Image: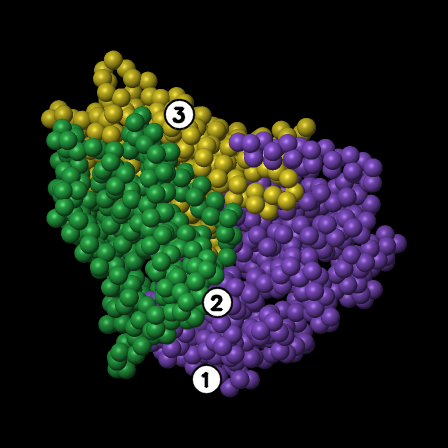
Amino acid sequence: MIQSILDGILTGAIISLGAIGLTLIMHILRFANFAYAELLAIGAYVALVFDQLFPVLVPALDTAFAPLTLTGALALSMVIAMVLTGLSAVVIDALVFKRIRQKAGPLSMVFASFGVALVIRNVIVLIFGHHAQLYSQDIARATVISFDPLILIKPDQVFVLALALALMLALHLILTRTTFGFALRAVAENPSLAQVAGVRLSTMVAAVWVIAGSLSAVAGTLYALTNQLNPLIGHVFLLPVFAATIVGGIGSVYGAVLGGFIVGIASGLALMILPPGYAPAMPFLIILAVLLFRPQGLFGEEQQ
Amino acid sequence: MNRKMLYLAGASMMALGLQAGTAAAQDCSVNVGTIYPTSVDWGRPIAETALWVGEMINEAGGVDGCEVNMILRDDQNDARVGVDAARALVDIDQVELLLGTVSSGISIPILTSVTAPAGVMQMSCCSSSSRLTEIAESGEARGLWFRTFATADVQAAVAAMLARDAGIQNITVVYKNDDWGQDIGRLAAEAFEAVGIEVLDQIAITDAQPSYRAEATQALRGQPESLYLALYPVEGISFVREWIGLGGTTTMIGANSLKSDDFRTTVGLENLAEFTGTDTSSPRVQSAADFIEAYTANFDAAPSGPGLANSFDAAAIALLAYHAAGRDASGEEIAAQVSRVTDPAGEPIPATVEGFASAMEILSGGGSVSYQGATGAVTFDANGNVSAPAVSWGFDDSGVVEQSYISLEEVAAFMASTN
Amino acid sequence: MIGLVSYLTFFLTMAGIMAIITLGLNLHWGYTGLFNGGVVAFFGAGAYGTMILGGPSQPDQFGGFELPYLVALGGGVVIAGALAWVVGLLTLRLRHDYLAISTFGIAVALEAVARNAQWLTGGARGLRGFPRPFEDQIDNNFLFGVVFLLIVLTVLGLIWLSIERLVNSPFGRALRAIREDEVAARALGKNPVRLRLWSLVIGAAIMGAGGGLYVSYTAFVSPQDLLPILTFQIWAMLIVGGAGNNRGAVLGAVLIWGVWTLSGFALTRLAPASMQIDAGSIQYILIGTLIVCMLIWRPEGLLPEKIKKSQPMTARKAASNSTRE
């Protein structure tokens, strides 16, 4: 029980990171972006490329920070992945979503995002192949916290949780303490009014894509660090990330964080009640349950 | 754009070149349909293996003197796409022989709505569902269906034998939540209990989940002495790494689907010392070794991953039967010749280009051969199922090593004793 | 030559089944503005329902009632409608994107049931042996294909006519009214919740008919038929064809299904041998690119809704307004 909750919190941290970006995108651009989770895959693969490149250039980077399996090379690669994934998010927007936004409604955007997801995923397959890859072959061993009840934690997962919380705090400060944060919130509240007040909408949209892209890059890399990397990770993450966003309420960063933890914990606890075969349905049962009581999500604003 | 144009230009030139070449060397060709999920991780090498057999057969002289033209279609792991591809192959390319596919959920609708009604022979490497046996028994398949994948009961029984001999007291069964996994997981649990091993838990692993932490935690709850794994490499790697990280036992018995380099390198040899695999195998170990050697020479990598040996044998047996039936044969006529290729009393032939050439000679002369393939001297029963002896295997630093060989009689006697 | 005709017969059969489902979705989205993200759930309910009612009985397996074909097919349609009724009660008060993700989740949950509830659905092995209509009477495989195509076209025609009548009836006008402006419709005494529920049920029943026809062709159904890719295909068909226009829906179904399958066929002909093994991935990239380009080039679809005088706003504007409300 305690173990399941703990596991849920650790998985939830990664889902939360992914959900923050999605909730901002869905709020400002007002469409369900099904290509969003592919940004996780882009980030993780970019990190993989540099992670393999750095140790060749600077061998010292290849030692792991004990007790983590994270190496200096990977930490650096993750930063590069954040930048490059943020940029690719902006490029994808300019190539596809911007054009459609100018001509059509949100539904066209939803379907375009499906198409974009298909393209990205299969381009990754063409370049990297289907097979599973790892940053480190070493298996991260769990530390026993308590024997009765048995509670195990992996150092990597604690690191993931800490990093995720730190990034969330940073984002919180940006959104509440900076002019940029105010502008962003103004755009989200009322795009036309914000423009009248001198906020450049296109800059804001690009900024949101950069934030979403870089957070996804971190989420993707951390996921690949604690599990494995294959071209399907975007596909695998899509549903939990959406669930977290909706449970939290679209547009609410704190809701997304909480939603991520709820989805993570509930999926862990679900196995105590449901047979494991039903695990994929779990995020949706949570969504349904939350929406039945709060149709706008936990932190969503009342519509209409 | 330019690249695209180049590809197109290249393609048409190649097509022209091929036609010219064919006209000069061989004055005919036979189309053979191949449907495998090339856009899915484990599907791709299976398809490559089948295409390679086509090349070998051509080198050996082709089917009844005609060049084999293997037409590959992707089923996208989607039944509607697979059925459409099969229809296109049967109707437009006029194939009489179809190889494929992997997933039973696609092989079955292709069999019941395309190949069987059209009288086309279908041979699959890897479809394992027991529904297929039912279809064959009911007569719906009209004798046109074959598969080189031994049904799950042999592997399940061998796993129980190995566990019993290792003195294991209790075990937790972890299975992939698809038709194959549900079948083999259930059969293995029954077999373990039949030899007095306590089955603590049976855990379904649904693919494409973000984390298998919860499943691993659940498996850990019973503190099992050993684990039975009926998983594919992708989720197998995730689950086992999680499991070992949590301090679970490394005494594991795995199905042949885990015979994969990816699995070996990512889980790590140091954790696999107590891993034992099961597989169906050849009574003459040599042919399996030959296959591995030839495969390695051709693809620059050892055959790893599920279904490669089965895919090789499916293609080879089917094409040899096509040869025996003649270039203008119908699907029914090809199916009728399969027994001449897999005749235990026939001349044993190895799975090499020379072997194919000599087999073709014997078959053309009206004789019969015993094909010694990558999975051994395969024979089919009336339902198109193979029965085969078994091996146990483990991992070492060079790849996969065979540990012990369990003959068909031993397997049969063991299965009879547990029922 | 006969081969080509035979393949075309089959292609049109499949495209016809897709078109039926697309018509159901058009009633949901095109005429009522319901963002149904779980098309495959209703398709699956119809498919499994038909199979359980009309399939052969098997040991240790619920179902296999061997009912006559039309009863089984009708039963599948009713089951799909009933599922929609329950789903509607749970989700219809949600706004657009929430409704979409909830219905999507219901489809995933249904797939999990199909995969795990072995007593009911056969589990991952699926259910088999549905007696294909008229197969015993018709010896010839080609002729069977033609007869089956006629069955599909008849059903398609009947559904088309019914929807056309429905949307031009007072009920249909009320549906469009709530799609355009729910508050105004309510002020005029229409009950939007009940109207939406009926639209959801009728559209889902149509999708169920598509599922029933599909199993009666393949004689087999398994969880593999319930993957979300079907939902995406059907939506792509409706959006490319033109929402709110039945002709657009059918045109979109034929076009997208054509692209989906012909791209695979074309690649086996055109791509060089060394690339054949990558053809699967290339095909996906082509399909994805095509859909994106189509949406950039003509977002309202090939045959957009024809706006009559009484409807000042376009469907598209209404859609964007209602998500922004």
Where is residue B292? Give x, y as percent.
Answer: 67, 65
**Front label number (1 vs 2):** 2
Q: Find residue B154 and report its image quarter.
A: bottom right
- What colouring method underlies this structural image? by chain
Q: Is residue B417 left or right of residue B211?
A: right
Cα–Cα span, label 1 and label 2: 28 Å
Chain at tag 2: B
What residue type is disc 1 on? Gln
Cα–Cα span, label 3 and label 2: 46 Å
The C terminus of chain B - image quarter: bottom right
Apparent colour of chain A: green
Apparent colour of chain B: purple
Where is residue C140? Give x, y as percent.
Answer: 65, 36
Picture residue at 55% right of the left edge, 65% below the top? B260
Picture residue at 24% right of the left edge, 36% below the top? A203
What residue type is disc 2 on? Thr
